[in-house]
Image (spheres, helix red, strand yellow):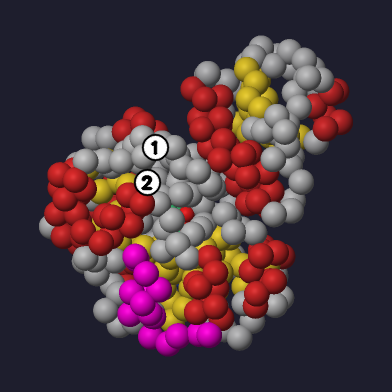
Amino acid sequence: MPHQPKADELERAAHAVRSGELVAFPTETVYGLGADALNARACAKIFEAKNRPYFDPLIVHVASFEEACQLWSKLDPRAAQLAKHFWPGPLTIVLLKAVKIPDLVTAGLATVAVRVPAHPVALELLKHAQRPIAAPSANPFGYISPTTAEHVRTQLGAQVPVILDGGPCVVGVESTILDLSAPQARLLRPGGVPVEALEALIGPVVLAEEENRPEAPGQLPSHYAPRAKLILIDDAQLCAEKVSRRVGLLAFKDASKARGYASVEVLSKSGDLAEAAANLFAALRRLDAAGLEEIHAQAVPETGLGRAIMNRLKKAAGPR
Ligand code: TXA
Ligand code: MG
């Protein structure tokens, strides 16, 4: 593997976790900013480093389904079935929490969100640290999530003593979050596992964003946002647009009809949603680094991974 950290680096990172320090590490979705999930003081450092509000709960990472079961107070057969299929992988499962999990991690909720990441470096770190690791994405709160170690270094390098480099994240959008704490399964956040794949196993899943009740805690209207103002556009607007020099374009597959943009990123020339997801956050960062006033983002089809991409783009375009 091209980006495998050396054994002593992993050991140093594991030691940092055990000592209550922060470690940034790669997962298949985005880079995480991790701390010992059973140590509230360590987890408080995550909130400080990210400037994250305390009402936004963290996802806890473990190395196996058996370890996940120790963080939940009650198991659900649907969780066992989904874990068997999708773990390690970009699926986070929310169930009633075990007493030992600090309230800071769950923002006082009765539930905890848990997943087994599908990245060899993350799994090695978890095994060496011998602790569940709470980790949000390793970016300042509200900004674009990091998909390379360099993204983390640039923004949080000063606050994070250890940053493990595992290469670019292959999925590129965060995990799907599924709430199984009630009889009706609820999708709290679309992500790396398409909701269609979950429904094929456990039947209908309600989409929280289409329900008339508050969304998942922490799912604020503005998130994943570049500095430049982001505007979602459809194909017609793309062709009609008369743009000044300081507007960039984030195109899905074809930018040939676009005129006058200062800077253009194409997410997937072949129109592949998985490739588009993997490129999304890095492309947004490159556009943002170009000092633009506005970024126009072309809508993608809202099926499969497209649902997660559109969720991120809508939030990046959300009111600040
Ligand atoms: O792919 C991912 O999930 C990445 C990598 C690092 O694993 N992590 C990640 O964490 O995206 P973060 O902090 O950016 O998103 C966590 C979100 C919270 O904002 C909240 O919406 C939801 O997970 N969450 C966490 N615990 C929850 C709970 N008990 N009930 C409902 N939602 C919860
Ligand atoms: Mg995040």
Label 1 residue SS: loop
Kindly check if marks 1 and 2 are in contact, taking CB atoms under 8 A apart as contact. yes
Q: Which residue is mark 1?
A: 167
Asked if residue 11 is positioned above or below residue 282 in the image, the reply reads below
Q: Is residue 318 left or right of residue 47?
A: right
The verdict on residue 75 being magenta is yes
Front-lying residue, 77 or 145: 77
Amino acid type of the residue tagged 1 in the rendering: Gly
* Label 2 sits on residue: 26
Query: Upstream in the sequence, badge 1 or badge 2?
Result: 2
Residue extent of the magenta highlight: 62-77
Label 1 – label 2 distance at C-alpha: 8 Å
Residue 183 in view (yes/no): yes
Visible residue check, residue 37: no
Name the quadrant of the C terminus.
top right
What is the x, y in percent for residue 207? 68, 67
The dot on residue 143 is: none
